[in-house]
Amino acid sequence: MYGTLAYATARRMNEIGIRMALGAQREQVVAMVFRENAQIAIAGCGAGLIAAVLASRVLASFLYEISPRNPWVVLFSIALLMAIASAASLLPALRAARIDPMAAIRCD
């Protein structure tokens, strides 16, 4: 997850450099990158939730003394994945906020 989010952020370094050259603050850049990565993580959790509900009969054979549709387990899983996604997107967001705008523009 970290690698994918870092790669997606690195591909946008020119755009981020231009935003910073035009006056965007570092906090705004971190919030923008973090928000976009969170949207990707939310979409992934939604798709995974749908797949888990559809595959619940198959998953039932792997679970011991718990229902595959237990709401607490589902909520805990989603919360854990969102926490991991937040941690994975924090480092690329901080790295994007530290770039030099002139170096990012000269890259092309």
Image (spheres, rainbow, N blue to C red):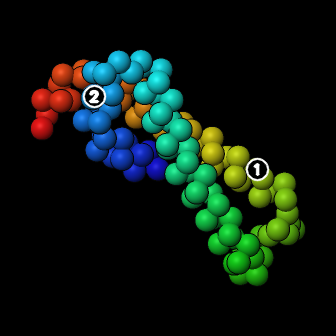
Type of amino acid under label 1: Phe
Q: Position of residue 17 (x, y in %)?
A: 27, 28
Q: Position of residue 28 (x, y in %)?
A: 47, 24
Q: Is residue 35 left or right of residue 54?
A: left
Instruction: Check disc 2 and report its element: helix, strand or loop.
Output: helix
Q: Residue at x 24, y 23 (%)?
A: 101
Residue highlighted by disc 1? 76
Q: Position of residue 51 (x, y in %)?
A: 65, 72
Evaluate if marks 1 and 2 touch, with contact meaning CB atoms under 8 Å apart. Answer: no
Q: Which mark is residue 17?
A: 2
Q: Is residue 1 left or right of residue 15?
A: right
Marks 1 and 2, Cα distance to the nearest angstrom? 38 Å
104 or 60: nearer the viewer:
104
The answer, for residue 91, to whether it is visible in the render is no
Please count the marks in the image: 2
Q: Residue at x 12, y 38 (%)?
A: 108
Q: Residue at x 76, y 50 (%)?
A: 76
45 or 56: nearer the viewer:
45
| Quadrant of the image occupied by residue 21 | top left
42 or 4: nearer the viewer:
42
Q: Position of residue 79 (x, y in %)?
A: 70, 46
Question: How busy is the neighbourhood of tag 1: few (under 14 within 10 Å), some, or many (20 plus)?
Answer: few
Question: How busy is the neighbourhood of tag 2: few (under 14 within 10 Å), some, or many (20 plus)?
Answer: many
Type of amino acid under label 2: Gly
Q: Identify whether 63 is placed above or below 19.
A: below
Instruction: Check disc 1 and report its element: helix, strand or loop.
Output: helix
Label 1 vs 2, first from the N-terminus = 2
10 or 3: nearer the viewer:
10
Q: Identify whether 61 is placed above or below 17.
A: below
Q: Residue at x 53, y 38 (%)?
A: 35
